[in-house]
Image: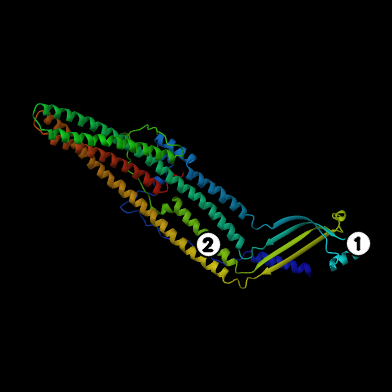
Amino acid sequence: MKRFNIITILLLVFIWSGCSVSKDLALPESLAPKMFRNSTPKDSSNIGDLPLKSFINDLTVQNLIDTALVRNYDMQIALKNIDAAEVLFKQSKLGYLPELKLQVAASSSRPSDNSLNGLSLNQFTGSTHIEDYTANLGVFWEADIWGKIRNQKAGALASYLQTEEARKAVQTRLVSNVAQGYYNLLMLDAQLDIARKNLKLNDSTLRIINLQFDAGQVTSLAIQQAQAQQLNAAQLVPRLEQNVILQENALSVLIGTLPQSINRSNRLDKMVIPQDLNAGFPSALLSRRPDIKSAELALNVANARVGVAKASLYPSLVITASGGVNSFKASNWFNVPASLFGLVSGGITQPIFQRGQLKSNLALAKIDREKTVIQFRQSVINAVGEVSDELTKFEKLKTQYSIAAKRAQTLQQASRNANLLFKSGMANYLEVITAQGNLLQSELELTTIKIEQLNAVVGLYRSLGGGWN
């Protein structure tokens, strides 16, 4: 009969262990639109699918990115988070196994001679103290009747995968920041060359006006205005030199090194802007963007927490067993089988009243799960918005650059004509100064638009989920 009862209980345990007290909440469907705003994809492929070194083929940028992936401290922290999550996940996989504890203990007590224990001890053993020696192995096992351990394991797995997606997100952002920082350096180099060239042009104009002043052809006002123009151009040079150093320092910190000079093997005017970048369909974002995948895994974690919280409301079956040797004399401690002892017990515990704590935990877990769904929706909308923004920038900047290039070309010709006319006495100094100032601003603006184009290309690559593969 006892054997029958034990077998019956074990069968019920295995049947109940397949029960589930909570239902997982699925991800919302049809969040992504059919296509991005103002974009007509040719096919399902997009630049986010390209490997990093296929998309960025500049060797200097590749080397900077490789250094950043190894030495950047945010990246290192992300990798350590993965290691920590992996440890917790491995621990959760052992949840079905029983706990084993080995205990070895020895004690000695001396009761008072005037106490009942002392009188009894002296009467029956003839001793004034008693010793006790124990060595036992204890087993504790909780049956996973309602799926609590299974949900804990699922939650640990989702958390581990979340840390991997977090690493991918850090990497995509790092790749984008390093590339854009390098491109900003090229822009500053180009602007510095423009400022120095313009400063030489202003110096030449000032010398001619000084000669005209000596000949009595112009007043001191002309010299003052030319000097002001020349000082304005001169002031721009140290400002740009400062920005170059600050950008080098920022890029050095980004790649995990002390501030230092950054070698540049390219020039801004040699950088080629891609003319056709396919963004594909928005549905691809759901599988490529690390932040969206992380939000999806967060729902798995939330579902698991709801399952654990709900399982805590139901009975738990715990089986314990211990056995070993025990003796009140050290000489008889390992006298087998006389010193052997054993204990087996099983119990079912049903929570009844814990001041509403368990129900509150379940309600909070469900609320957190609903918040996770909202956050997932928001992450999809944000991703689609980022891609749409970068696509708009990319298209509109092409038009802006074309117009700015024509304007700069026109002003270059105007500046040359103004200088020729000024030398022949057919134009005054104000026309020359105005032409030079306009040319400086147009050339600086042209480099700014060029760098915005490069940054938009990198931004589109990142927003499409590229950079982590």
Give left or right: position of 444 versus 281: left
Q: In which quarter of the view is residue 204 placed? A: top left
Q: Is residue 466 above or below residue 338?
A: above
Residue under pointer 2: 303
Identity, as a three-letter code, of the amino acid under mark 2: Asn
Q: Nearer the viewer, mark 2 or mark 1?
A: 1
Quadrant including the N terminus: bottom right
> Nearer the N terminus, badge 2 or badge 1?
1
The percent position of residue 450, horizontal first and vertical second, equals 30, 40
Q: Between marks 2 and 1, how big is the CA–CA gap?
A: 65 Å
| Residue 271 visible, this orientation | no
- Mark 2 burial class by Cα count in 10 Å: few <14, some 14-19, many 20+: many
Q: Which of the pair 234/460 is nearer the observer? A: 234
Identity, as a three-letter code, of the amino acid under mark 1: Gly
Query: SS for tag 2?
Result: helix
The percent position of residue 40, horizontal first and vertical second, equals 32, 51
Residue 126 — which label?
1
Q: Which of the pair 248/265 is nearer the observer? A: 248
Identify the residue at image location x=75%, y=55%.
103
Identify the residue at image location x=57%, y=67%.
310
Q: Residue furthest front?
A: 114
Q: Which of the pair 389/119 is nearer the observer? A: 119
- Mark 1 burial class by Cα count in 10 Å: few <14, some 14-19, many 20+: few
The percent position of residue 303, horizontal first and vertical second, equals 53, 62
The image shows a total of numbered marks equal to 2
| Residue 450 visible, this orientation | yes
Query: SS for tag 1?
Result: loop
Q: In which quarter of the view is residue 408 placed? A: top left
Residue 330 — which label?
none
The percent position of residue 199, horizontal first and vertical second, equals 23, 32
